[in-house]
């Protein structure tokens, strides 16, 4: 049986990443980038597809945690003969990718067992392995094409196409192993100083997290969520991946399995907003610079997603040799949705860049002209149908949410000209903005319910409609919005959380889904902004309870079975958690301020 998705921990050096299970098995590792071919792919298959198990023999996990403000993972083990502590991390060292696993015996004696199964290229390749001796001692070297994997540490012995080892430790004694990726033509590498690497890793993460501005009831999960967003941001390029995994299913055993190791403009823009709200302007500027490089060129070539360095070609292919997580096929790498037209994307990007401008970051001779070109792209495609926020693989439609986001792009463009004096055809944009508004209010509202509809040609709702008041198109407490919320609550609620939409509708795929966490966080924000604060608190508390023991969230969650579903951890879930927590805190502060003002007024009344 597959390890529950929520039982995995994320480690990252902001270039590569891995997932390690609660029982000490690294089942997913991509080196040297998050979108590189995995060398450990047991997550999507079996141990034969690559993994590194390191665990005390007959051990049980007493608990595990990240050191505060870091991605240094500490796991406490107990065995019949003693206790041990395992510390794992990826040092953020320029020019190399390392994974450190350190174990220390705390009491008695413990036997530490290893099984290392290196399988580059998503588990399809058995590397050539040899033991190399140099001035620093000896190390294990595994080579497969352009990649070499170097293991320093106490010796593991070959056993068929695996390497195993068992090491007895007494109280106070420790061992460390370091796995390093290098280009195969470069060859060996100097082993890291584990103690110094741990110090640098702690300092790196703590220096960043110490600057996070967070308060309120959920400050802890907000901090962890912002750390996750940081971990998913490439240190060199500024590209933010949607998740570090591929093909973790939305419907176990089904076909809803996608590669999320790419940079969606939408997700990245919303991440930028979350960072800005918590004082991290430098991260937002790093992403803006990535965006400008990625989308530079003819606006007609604009894509909804790009590679980590801005790559445009992301062809989707199927890995037939992998059986998939929980037997969910196909396993995909690449993403064919890159070729879709999703009309909402430019709106989300322009909103985020407007907020960066409002935060005091000045436009330069590159950033504003490119935004103008993106808004002109909206103008040219204002009559086109699209695939919607959820990347429907069925026929295109006029999605109401998409039309509102086009309105938002035009609206922010007009404001940039009128409020900041930036050059542009403000009058033309304003005219189209008003035409779109009239169209949406005419065609995007149900005559029966009085609320917004998913598309102009159906009466369904989907949870993306909860984003409409976030754009300023309509107030959170407008009767149209309240009617929309009522229908969403009625049609999309499953075990107290929200689905994205009813899959019997327009997505063109077989199978079903579980509640999509971002949608429920949007509902929290809607409740908070429309005066339903007790319900916002209740739903937020329930959603926070869905986080794993390490504070991580997948794409979806099954409340009945209490397990995570979909790619993990998911940036979209974490950034909407941050927004929801901020909305409730803001509403609470506003409510307290209002009560204070009323009390003061009463006291002053003669």
Image (tube, helix red, strand yellow):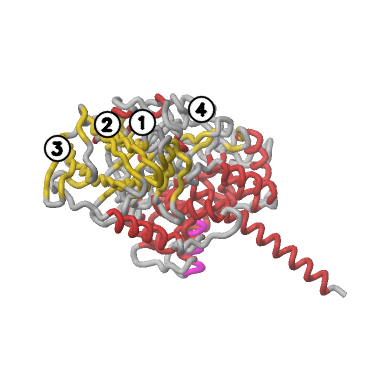
Q: Are marks 4 and 1 in contact (CB under 8 Å)?
A: no
Question: Residue 600, percent across and down?
Answer: 78, 70
- Look at the numbered disc 4 and give the secondary structure of its residue: loop
**Labels 3, 4: front one:** 3
Magenta stretch, main secondary structure, is helix
Between residues 427 and 306, which one lies in front from this camera angle?
A: 306
In this picture, which residue range is highlighted in magenta? 410-420
What residue is at 27 percent from the left and 49 percent from the top? 98
Which of the marked residues, 3 or 2, is nearer the chain's N terminus? Answer: 2
To which residue does mark 4 refer? 512
**Magenta segment: does it hold 9?**
no
Quadrant (top left, top right, bottom left, bottom right) of the N terminus:
top left
Asked which secondary structure carries label 3, the reply is: strand
Foreground mark, 4 or 1, reads: 1
**Rounded to the nearest whole Å, what is the CA distance between mark 3 and mark 4?**
47 Å
Q: Is residue 16 above or below residue 350?
A: above
Residue 408 position (above or below residue 514): below
First of labels 4, 1 by sequence position: 1
Q: Assess whether mark 2 and mark 1 are in contact (beta carbons under 8 angstroms).
A: yes
Please give the name of the residue rendered at 57% of the width and 46% of the height, measured from the top-left corner: 522
Residue 172: percent from the left, percent from the top?
A: 35, 49
Pointer 1 residue: 44
Please name whichever residue, 169 or 540, is drawn nearer the observer in this view of the structure: 169
Q: Does the magenta-highlighted stretch encompass residue 419?
A: yes
Q: First in sequence, mark 2 or 4: give its number.
A: 2
Q: Residue at x 58, y 31 (%)?
A: 560
Q: For the residue labelled by badge 2, is the local secondary structure a helix, a strand or a loop?
A: helix
Mark 2 vs mark 4: give the one in front: 2
Badge number at residue 123: 2
């Amino acid at each position: 049986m597959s390890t529950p998705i929520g039982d995995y921990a994320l480690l990252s050096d902001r270039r590569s990443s891995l997932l390690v299970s609660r029982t000490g098995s690294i089942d997913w590792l991509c080196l040297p980038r998050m979108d590189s071919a995995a060398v450990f792919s047991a997550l999507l298959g079996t141990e034969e597809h690559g993994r590194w198990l390191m665990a005390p023999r007959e051990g049980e996990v007493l608990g595990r945690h990240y050191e505060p403000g870091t991605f240094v993972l500490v796991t406490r083990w107990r065995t019949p003969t003693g206790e041990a502590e395992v510390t794992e991390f990826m040092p953020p060292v320029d020019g190399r990718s390392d994974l450190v696993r350190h174990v220390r015996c705390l009491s008695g004696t413990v036997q530490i067992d290893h099984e290392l199964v290196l399988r580059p290229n998503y588990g399809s390749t058995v590397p050539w392995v040899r033991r190399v001796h140099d001035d620093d001692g000896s190390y294990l070297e595994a080579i497969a094409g352009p990649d070499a994997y170097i293991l320093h540490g106490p010796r593991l012995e070959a056993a068929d196409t695996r390497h195993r080892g068992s090491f007895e430790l007494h109280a106070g004694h420790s061992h460390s192993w370091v796995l390093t990726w290098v280009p195969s033509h470069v060859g060996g590498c100097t082993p890291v100083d584990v103690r110094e690497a741990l110090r640098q890793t702690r300092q790196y993460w703590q220096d960043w997290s110490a600057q996070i501005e967070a308060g309120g009831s959920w400050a802890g999960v907000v901090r962890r969520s912002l750390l996750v967003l940081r971990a998913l941001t490439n240190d060199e390029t500024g590209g933010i991946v949607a998740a570090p995994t591929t093909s973790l299913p939305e419907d176990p055993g089904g076909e809803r399995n996608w590669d999320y190791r790419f940079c969606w403009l939408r997700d990245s823009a919303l991440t930028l907003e979350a960072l800005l709200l918590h004082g991290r302007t430098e991260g937002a500027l790093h992403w803006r610079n990535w965006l400008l490089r990625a989308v530079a060129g003819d606006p007609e070539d604009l894509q909804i997603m790009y590679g980590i360095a801005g790559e445009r070609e992301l062809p989707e292919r199927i890995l037939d040799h992998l059986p998939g997580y929980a037997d969910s096929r196909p396993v995909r790498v690449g993403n064919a949705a890159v070729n879709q037209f999703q009309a909402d994307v430019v709106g989300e990007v322009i909103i985020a860049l407007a907020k960066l401008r409002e935060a005091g970051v000045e436009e330069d001779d590159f950033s504003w002209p490119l935004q103008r070109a993106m808004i002109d792209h909206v103008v040219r495609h204002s009559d086109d149908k699209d695939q919607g926020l959820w990347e429907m693989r069925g026929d295109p439609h006029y999605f109401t949410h998409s039309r509102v986001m086009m309105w938002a792009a035009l609206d922010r463009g007009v404001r940039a000209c009128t409020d900041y004096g930036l050059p542009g055809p403000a009058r033309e944009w304003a005219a189209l903005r008003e035409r779109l508004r009239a169209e949406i209010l005419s065609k995007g509202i149900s005559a029966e319910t009085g609320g917004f509809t998913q598309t102009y040609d159906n009466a369904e709702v989907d949870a993306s409609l909860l984003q409409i008041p976030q754009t300023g198109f309509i107030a959170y407490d407008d009767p149209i919005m309240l009617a929309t919320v009522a229908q969403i609550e009625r049609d999309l609620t499953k075990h107290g959380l929200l689905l994205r939409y009813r899959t019997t509708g327009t997505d063109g795929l077989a199978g079903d889904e579980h509640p999509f966490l971002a949608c429920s966080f949007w509902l929290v924000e809607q409740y908070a902004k429309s005066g339903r604060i007790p319900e916002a608190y209740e739903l937020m508390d329930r959603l926070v309870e869905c986080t794993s023991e390490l504070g991580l969230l997948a794409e979806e969650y099954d409340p009945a079975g209490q397990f995570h579903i979909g790619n993990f951890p998911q940036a979209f879930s974490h950034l909407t958690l941050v927004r929801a927590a901020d909305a409730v805190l803001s509403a609470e502060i506003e409510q307290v301020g209002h009560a204070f003002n009323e009390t003061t007024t009463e006291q002053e009344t003669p």
